[in-house]
Amino acid sequence: MFKISEASKKVDLPIATIRYYAELNMIPSLKRNIENQRIFDDESITWLEGIKFFRELGMPIAEIKEYIELSQKHGKAALIKRHKLLIKQEQKAQENVIQAQNNLDELKRRITLENEIIKGHKQDSLNPARRFNQ
């Protein structure tokens, strides 16, 4: 069993964030001790790691809550709904990869241009706006 400060270190989330998730009932296995302090077991830590993963993907809290609720249900209908949520996140992640690649390509183009200016092969623009967006 872990105190909230220990859980925070274990999953690398701020205590305030963990409290927020707890208040939203997003940690189904969360319990309280006799002093009404939150106590986290391995299952609670697993829930937090899952929440953190989905948040890093950019998944909205409402969808994470839905996924958690569906994860506690049995049957094909719940499985299909969970699957659809994951497919939706996969599509968003793929879009993010494409955007990141486009950003990387543009950054490389700008670095190449700066190298050409440094070597004297191209002239630097005296216009600050153009310099920013060459």
Image: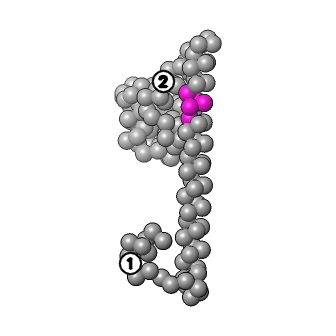
Please say if the residues under marks 1 and 2 sit with CB atoms less than 8 Å apart: no
Q: Which quadrant of the view contains residue 94?
A: top right
Secondary structure, magenta segment, majority class: helix
Asked which secondary structure carries label 2, the reply is helix
Image coords of residue 31 (percent x, y): 45, 25
Between 60 and 33, the one lying in front of the other is 60
Asked which secondary structure carries label 1, the reply is loop
Q: Which disc is residue 8 wearing?
A: none
Q: Amino acid at mark 2?
A: Glu
Q: Residue at x 42, y 73 (%)?
A: 130
- Report the residue marked by disc 1: 127
Q: Residue at x 59, y 49 (%)?
A: 98
Q: What stretch of residues is rendered in magenta?
A: 85-89
Residue 35 higher or lower than 131, as above or below: above
Does the segment drawn in magenta span residue 88?
Answer: yes
Q: Residue at x 44, y 43 (%)?
A: 5
Residue 12 higher or lower than 106, as above or below: above
Image coords of residue 102 (percent x, y): 57, 56
Disc with the residue nearer the chain's start (1 vs 2)? 2
Q: Which quadrant of the view contains residue 90?
A: top right
- Report the residue marked by disc 2: 66
Between 134 and 5, the one lying in front of the other is 134
Q: Which quadrant of the view contains residue 108?
A: bottom right
- Compute the Cα span from label 1 to label 2: 51 Å
Q: Amino acid at mark 1?
A: Asn
Between 84 and 111, the one lying in front of the other is 111
Neighbours of disc 1 within 10 Å: few (<14), some (14-19), many (20+)? few
Between 76 and 22, the one lying in front of the other is 76
